Amino acid sequence: MSEAIPHQDPRLLDDQGIAGHPRGLMVLFFTEMWERFSYYGMRALLILFLVAPVAQGGLGMHIAKAAGIYGTYEMSVYLASLPGGWVADRWLGQRKAVALGAILIALGEFILAASGTVHVFYAGLVVIVAGTGLLKPNCATLVGALYADNDTRRDPGFTIYYMGVNLGALIAPIICGFLAQDPRFMGFLSHIGLATTSGWRWGFGAAGAAMVLGLIQFGLQQGKFGQAGLKPGSQQVEYGHASTQEALTPEERKRLWVVGILFIFSVIFWMTYQQAGSSLNLFADRLTRSQILGWSFPSTWFQSVNSAWLLLLAPILSWLWVRLGRRDPSSPTKFALGLLFVGLGMLLLVPAARVATSVTRVAPWWLVGTYGLHTIGELLLSPVGLSTTTKLAPARYQGLMMGVWYVSLGLGSKLAGKVAGLFETLPLPTIFGSLFLMTAVAALVLILLTPRIKLLMGGVR
């Protein structure tokens, strides 16, 4: 008796997109690019707006309180991914969740732009949190759903997708920061009769407009997704997986243990990395020269440096993983290296922090170097974490487990805000040096655990 030939997964035939990837990849690339423009454009302004004097259009908060709000917002954005993924798995499907999330994000940004009181501003943050919780995990889950099991294009595909994240993060602080801070734009507003303190509103408004653009292009290109994310569990039914929520198998439990272990190290990574929007943003604004060759620029532009590095380095690392083939380092090994590099970035700033004062500001190259090291760490950990989660999570729990991944970012961001709250109470060399020691120790521990983790992964790299 001849054996039945298994039906070929139709996703393997979808290779008409960029570099032989599925057609829907670039739709999600631009959806996430505009969402990240919205997010990073607003984030570049947030803590600076909170601490800016009322006379300059800000809320006049102390750094400790502003850092606490910043950390709580960052945490909430990612914690909301857990219910956002669950709602998509059970009721909406990933596509509707992404669309609804985009609508809420745009609405929230416009509320920030129009807010006249602290309470309205907080309401805008809450709406953004709800929208991001729906869009963020489900957009990434849709990327995974475009690829068949063990499709070798998956990791490179997530790296391409991640470049969309950082393209948005690159241009957003430049545009939103210019609108909010640049004296030339303030002069233009004054010339046409608008208050010069309204630049913050223009920055928040630009973040909302970007999300509207992302929503429009996502809505117009639904045909490129096939059945992926159309209904709750639809991709599992279409491609031969069970759509019911049956109990986990022993193999699935082992793989979820790996997700849990990597979750812990991810929190440590993001606690350090997310200093970018808080303590490093303040370091740039108060202690770093915002000037190159006599040309001055808004301090928020430093928030684009990380993304510039990423767009430069991501193609190199993506090529390297493909070039290495079976010698490609395992996911836990990449995680450990990511922790080490993000720690080295903080170590680099220790000597700069020793000499920096409000009068004697340090050269911008210190932050450029730090963000370069952080970018290497990010590329080793973040897209790999996204890809690994989609590989290890059971198909019927994809959205939920992607939400769990983003929870690690949320907890790390909250801890980052706690650390940044010490900006005026502890010496900066102590803060930066302690972050380095913590990440270096975590990297060593993870290297020691890697052989056991690889066994639990059951052949998944």
Image (spheres, helix red, strand yellow):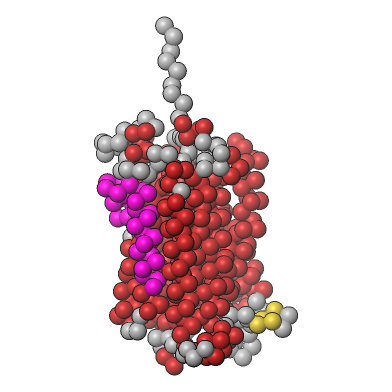
Q: Residue furthest right?
A: 293
Pick the front one: 454 or 234: 234
- Residue 375: % across, % down: 58, 61
Q: Is residue 338 magenta?
A: no
Identified at 52% across, 43% down, the residue is 23
- Residue 320: % across, % down: 65, 45
Q: Is residue 37 visible?
A: yes
Q: How many labels were placed on the picture?
A: 0
Q: Is residue 86 magenta?
A: yes
Pick the front one: 413 or 444: 413
Q: Residue furthest bottom?
A: 55
Q: Main secondary structure of the magenta part?
A: helix
Q: Is residue 434 visible?
A: no
Toward which corner of the image does residue 256 lie, by quadrant? Answer: top left
- Residue 407: % across, % down: 37, 58
Q: With respect to residue 246, does 357 lie above or below?
A: below
Q: Which residues are magenta?
A: 81-110
Identified at 45% across, 18% down, the residue is 5
Q: With respect to residue 422, does 232 lie above or below?
A: above
Along the horizontal axis of the image, is 340 left or right of 256? right
Q: With respect to residue 25, does 273 lie above or below?
A: below
Identified at 52% across, 41% down, the residue is 22
Q: With respect to residue 406, does 429 lie above or below?
A: below
Looking at the rendering, in which quadrant would you find the N terminus? top left
Identified at 46% across, 59% down, the residue is 214
Q: Residue furthest top?
A: 1
- Residue 138: % across, % down: 39, 51
Pick the front one: 203 or 412: 203
